[in-house]
Structures are given as structure tokens and as C-alpha cells.
Image (tube, helix red, strand yellow):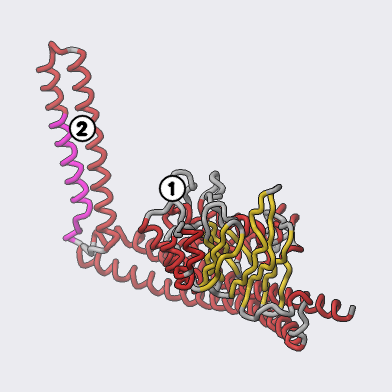
Amino acid sequence: MARIIDQLLLTFRMSQVERGKAKARFLKDYARIVEEKRTKKREASWKNRLQTQEIRLLPLAIRAAIDTDQVTKEKQFTLDRIDKKYVWKELAVRETARRKTQKFPQAEAELLTKRDNALALLEQKKNLAIQKIHRHYEPDQANLVSAQTAYTTKKQALDQANDIYKTRRQKKYDLQDQQFRKRIDQQLSSIARAIETHQTTVKKNVRLEPTFASDFPEEAILRCEGLTMRFGGLVAVDNLSFDVKEGEIFGLIGPNGAGKTTVFNCITKFYRPNSGEMYFRKNPVEVIRLNDYPVHRIIRQGIVRTFQNVELIWELTVIDNLLVAAHSLFHTGFFGQLVHTRKLKQEEMVLKDKAIAILTKMGLAPYMEMIPYGLPYGILKKIELARTLMVEPRMIILDEPAAGLNDQETEELAKLIREIRDTYQVTIFLVEHDMGLVMDICDTVAAISFGKLLAIGTPKMIQANKVVRDAYLGEE
């Protein structure tokens, strides 16, 4: 009984450590996003102020013959507007003449003459309007010196006002930043102390593990022992046992109908196996028995998966598909979601930033606001893979990720899987029929046939195994 109580306390403390680390990551991300937004907002505000100053100086700059960017921009904008105006008028005259000519073919010559006269008159009016604009932007030569003096005086006064404004605003911004950073640092410090307290207790009791985990290898993250799954009289998985090491890319291969996807469905509890045990290392000191968890709680243990067929929410945009996947990361409760509290807005801000970062890293940023309908199949596969990264998994299960991809897309996928493993420090467990991909990226490969394990080892060992070749490749 004492051992069970100690184990429960250890599990509680480890969950508190994980929760504290997640909260600390959230606060750091939130602080970074807020600071970036504040910086952009302040820069935009200052830019608008300077632009307003240029507009106020525009009449003086024109009279003083000072060719500023604002003068050039304003003049070009006016000329372009006049040009567009008369282009549409010319089109209207030509279209009117064409219709009248079709209606009264006997008066075609007279109508064409009227059209040419109207076009000539429009050209004359257009030239007069352009000349008027040029005259408006010509400097006042008679009072040029006084205009230049007035422009210089006005500009100096505005610059001094801007300097005073900038100094005052900067002090206010610095105070706001200090208060915000101080509040975040206090919260992070409190979380760090709590984590340290729990970790100290965990280190003292690190050997307190469940009985079933006493022989669980230190380097393993997943263990299946005697896994068996029957569908009536059909044995899909037959007494299958294997270990998956943490941080590796583990491949499961076999002919069609060998039971590969059934193994995935058992691990993720879509199926309840008839017999066998499945263990998963949730964190460095806690090993859980997956048999005890329902399907909707598997994702919270750090296991995520993709499917053979692309399973996206087709009515939502790509980025919303990723945000839906992050539902398990929300700490806001039902009523907080109902009234849309400040905490919920902060969580949405952090998760949206995270989704944008993942999509950008995977080259999917151009598709961010699109719905998945009509996108290339290779892009849809990448979106589904990106979605798994939203929940900070410890192990990603990929069910035939290269199915339907061409050679170039398969090469890109192989590179992407390695980058995900190295960048996010996750374990990859995949089923794949493309042997080139499997032998290229996998550290360990397990071959099964009719639900039974044939061999397990490195890709070279599997390639050289005669039993695998006989069963998988059809050799005699």
C-alpha cells in the first residue's frame, strides 16, 4: 500500500512538473508575441506621425521647390488618377460609337467622324488637366527664398515637437515594458520554484516505478508485449512483441494485410487488443500502461498519429485545422470558452503563432488561409503531418505517409521527417510500403507477416534476412 501511495505521489509530482514546464513555455511565448506586437504597433505609429508631418509640409515644399518623397508621390498619384479617368472616358466613347454603328450602318461614316472628334476633344481636355497639375506643382519663383525659409522654419518646429513626443513616448513605453517583463519574470520565477520542489522529490524517488515497468529499458519509449488482435476467426496481430527506442525512426513493414495499421490502431486504442500489454514512457521517470487509457486520452500522453487517408476538416482553413488539433493544450475551461475570457485570448494568440511557425517551417505558409479542397495531395499530407506537431508529442505515428506521392515529393518527405525528429526531439514510428523511404530514413525496421514478427533490426539486416525476402518480396 505504501508503495502504491508513493507511486501516486510521484505521478502527481511529475504531472505538476510537466504542467509547470508547459506553463513556463506558454508565458515565454506569450511575452515574446506581446513584445513583437508592441514593437510593430509603435513603429507603425511613428511612421504615421512622420507621414502626417510630410503632408502638412507639402504646400510649403511645393512653393519652395523642394522635391520631397511626399511631393513626388502626390504628383504621380494625381497624374495616374487623371490618366485612368480619361482612359475610361475614351472606352465609353468608342463603345458608344460601336453600338450606334451596328444599329445605324447607313450612318457609319458620320458616326465615326463624331467618334474621332469626341476622342480628340477628350485628348485636349486630358492635356489641359495635366498641364494644370504641372503648373500647380511649379515653385513660386517670385517668393522662392521666403518660401524656403518658411519651409525650413516649419520643418524645424515639427522636428523639435517630434523629438519631445518621441522622448515622452519612449519613457512611457519603457515603463510599460518594465512592468510587463517584471510581471512575467515573477510568474516564471514562481513556476521555476514549484518545478524545482517537485523535481527534488522526484529525484529522491526516481526508482519508484510500477511493477510492470521494472524491466522497461531506459532507452525505450514504447514496448508491445504479446500483442494480439482478432476479428472473429481472423487473427490480424498474432503475439507481436517489440521495443521502440526514444528518438529513433522506427519502421514497421509487411505485405498488404499483414496487420500493420491494426498495430497502430491498438496502440492508439482505436481497437482494444484481445491480449497483450503496451507500455509507454510518458516522461523520464514515468511509464504508463496504454491498455488502461481510452482513445481520447492517448493524445494527452504524448502520442499522436496520421492516417492512411487524409483526415482533415475540409470546411476549415489550413491554419484552423492546426488550431483544432491543439484543443488538448487549452487550459481554459468551459465557462472561459463560453464568455471568451482574456486567458482564452492569450492561449489562442500563442497557439496561432505556433501554428504559423510550424506552417512556415514546413513551407505551407502560402496555403495558410486556404481550405484544403483542391490542394495537391502532397500538400495535404504535409498539412496532416504539421497538425501532429501542434500538441508537442513525444512520439508521432505515421501510417503510410508517402502513399500517393511522386518521387520528388517522397524525397522531400524523407528530409522533412528527419528534420522533425531532430528539431522537435520526437520519436517517429511509421508504416510504409515504399522500401526506398524506409531503408533511407529508418534506424530500426520490424518486418511482420500475417500479424507475426519475422525479424527486427537495422535496415541492412532486414534487407539481408532471407525470411523477410521470402515473405515480403516473394522469393523462394
**Three-letter code, disc 2:** Glu
Residue range in magenta is 119-142
Label number found at residue 375: 1
Q: Position of residue 425 (x, y in %)?
A: 54, 74
Residue shown at 47% from the left, 49% from the top? 370
Of residues 111 and 62, the one nearer the viewer is 111
- As for residue 271 lying within the magenta part, the answer is no
SS category of the residue bearing label 1: loop
Residue furthest top in the image: 106
Q: Position of residue 387 (x, y in %)?
A: 55, 59
Residue shown at 17% from the left, 60% from the top? 142
SS category of the residue bearing label 2: helix
Tag 2: Cα neighbours inside 10 Å, few (<14), some, or many (≥20)?
Answer: some
Q: Position of residue 437 (x, y in %)?
A: 43, 63
**Three-letter code, disc 1:** Leu
Residue to which mark 2 is pinned: 90
Label number found at residue 397: none
Q: Main secondary structure of the magenta part?
A: helix
Can you say whether 352 is above or below 91 in the image?
below
